[in-house]
Amino acid sequence: MNKATLEGQFGYFRMVLGMTRKLVEQFPEDKLDFRPVPEVRSVSEIVGHNYQFMVEVATAVASGKMSDNPPPKFVKKAEMLKWMDEQIAKFYATFATLTDNQIAAKISAWGEEFPGWQLLGAAYDEHWHHRGQLTVYLRLCGIEPIMLYSYELLQA
């Protein structure tokens, strides 16, 4: 796996992230703490985890060391959306600096060794998983989610 291969995947991912933002915009301010059962993350906790993880992984590949920080807590939707945008910018700024050697290098995370490309793939997969959760959460709140492949919405 090399950077050129990942650039195609993460180029497409920019659109995915844009659509996820539109999905998150659908949540009313008073539903940011919604969780269907007590054992799962709330809307804002999912967003915090998902976008923080993406940056942590890119930073780990760049530095060779994985860190695990507590996700932020959000009170207002506007602050959460702004933070999401900032995380995306951080991710892509870090991704742009990565070399093939960094992408191939092994990084210790969760008691195992992973090549950098596999950690980046985990962030990609993690995003899809949590985006699915958010889609279900919207439905549970009585809100019909946007069609997530309507990329023309990104032009609006």
Image (cartoon, rainbow, N blue to C red):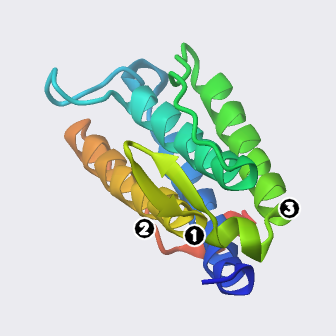
Q: As displayed, is residue 2 above or below residue 105?
A: below
Q: For residue 65, what is the image quadrant?
A: top right
**Of marks 3 and 1, which one's residue comes earlier in the chain?**
3
**Of marks 1 and 2, which one's residue comes earlier in the chain?**
1
Nearest the eye: 42 or 138: 42
Mark 1 residue element: helix
Q: Which mark is in front, 2 or 3?
A: 3
Q: Which mark is in front, 1 or 2?
A: 1
Badge 1: how crowded within 10 Å, few (<14), some, or many (20+)? Answer: many
Mark 3 residue element: helix
Residue at 56% x, 42% y: name it.
51
Nearest the eye: 100 or 89: 100
The dot on residue 57 is none
Residue at 75% x, 76% y: name it.
100
The dot on residue 147 is 2
**Of marks 2 and 3, which one's residue comes earlier in the chain?**
3
Residue at 67% x, 69% y: name it.
103
Instruction: Determine if residue 15 is in view.
Output: no
In the image, residue 75 lies at what x, y percent? 54, 13
Q: Are marks 1 and 2 in contact (CB under 8 Å)?
A: no
CA distance for labels 1 and 2: 29 Å
Q: Amino acid at mark 3?
A: Thr
Q: Which residue is mark 3?
A: 97
Q: Amino acid at mark 2?
A: Met
The dot on residue 117 is 1
